[in-house]
Amino acid sequence: MSDLKLKPEISFAETFLCSAFAACFAELFTIPLDTAKVRLQLQKKTATGDGVIVSKYRGLLGTVVTIAREEGLSALWKGIIAGLHRQFIYGGLRVGLYDPVKTFLVGSDFVGDIPLYQKILAALLTGALAIIVANPTDLVKVRLQAEGKLPSGVPRRYYGAMDAYYTIVRQEGLGALWTGLGPNIARNAIVNAAELASYDQVKQTILKIPGFTDNAFTHLLAGLGAGLFAVCIGSPIDVVKSRMMGDSAYKNTLDCFIKTMKYEGFSAFYKGFLPNFGRLGSWNVIMFLTLEQVKKVFIREVYYD
């Protein structure tokens, strides 16, 4: 027995459930910021009769207040059901597959710290695979969030998440549920790499600093770092993805990118940056803190040679 060592172990199914729960928990608390982000990304400047350029939504708090005032507080949670659908599937798969894919890339006999590029590659792959499965939930969530206050007598486009799935398939065909898949794969693969790889790397780096241990404060710092990396890298793709899903006027990803750049400039790709960081930063902190705590329920120590 003295030649045997202990290592923590948790199954894929257990990791999937922990990740899905943590992602849904974070989504529930941060979706008002995500709704504000989507509205800011979809917003197009309009000119008044005097030639003055005006924007309906201004900043994170201004957008939240405007939506709550005009549409009611509940409007900030538009798309929450589809959002929970998305996080259960996407959140569970992207995190659940991350460690197995890392192990596959470096080999089961690998000993030591896994190189950063292998972590990034693993996260790119799991993010892409997960969103291919979850794209319909993302589409419905964006469609519901994008719909603002309608004029009196104008019927709603959708009456909830399930109605949205049914209506989209009936009116646009089954393939329409994968609208925006290209930019969504690019966006989620890149953001997932920024989040998971940076969280993994930042946490590993912090734990090497004397006095730091694997506790909630370390998880909080690593989560904030993951959120910042994710927003800086993924914001342009996120804007294109939201516009393609929320507006059918674009022919494809390239068309959306060119039109946005031509008519609004490069800064348009960082529309909603602060609410996006506010959302992703807080989302990552809540998700990773919850995930680390929930995993403790399932992790067990096993002996190995």
Image (tube, helix red, strand yellow):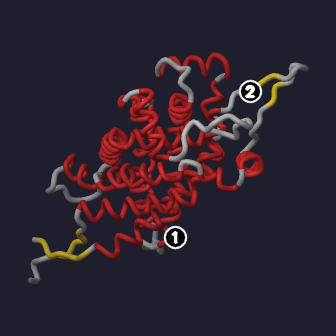
- Secondary structure beneath label 2: loop
Q: Where is residue 217 in the image (x, y as percent from the top left)?
A: 52, 70
Image-quadrant location for residue 21: bottom left
Check disc 2 and report the residue beneath it. Answer: 45
Q: Residue 291 carries which label?
A: none
Above or below, 53 relative to 287: above
Q: Which amino acid does label 2 sit on?
A: Lys
Closest to the observer, 128 or 121: 128
Check disc 1 and report the residue beneath it. Answer: 217
Residue located at (45% from left, 33% from top) = 168
101 sits to left or right of 182: left
Q: Position of residue 250 (x, y in %)?
A: 53, 20
Distance, label 1 to label 2, CA atoms, is 41 Å
Q: Which amino acid does label 1 sit on?
A: Phe
Residue 175 visible somewhere in the drawing:
yes
Closest to the observer, 208 or 84: 84
Front position among marks 1 and 2: 2
Image-quadrant location for residue 150: top right
Other residues around mark 2 within 10 Å, as few (<14) / some (14–19) / many (≥20): few
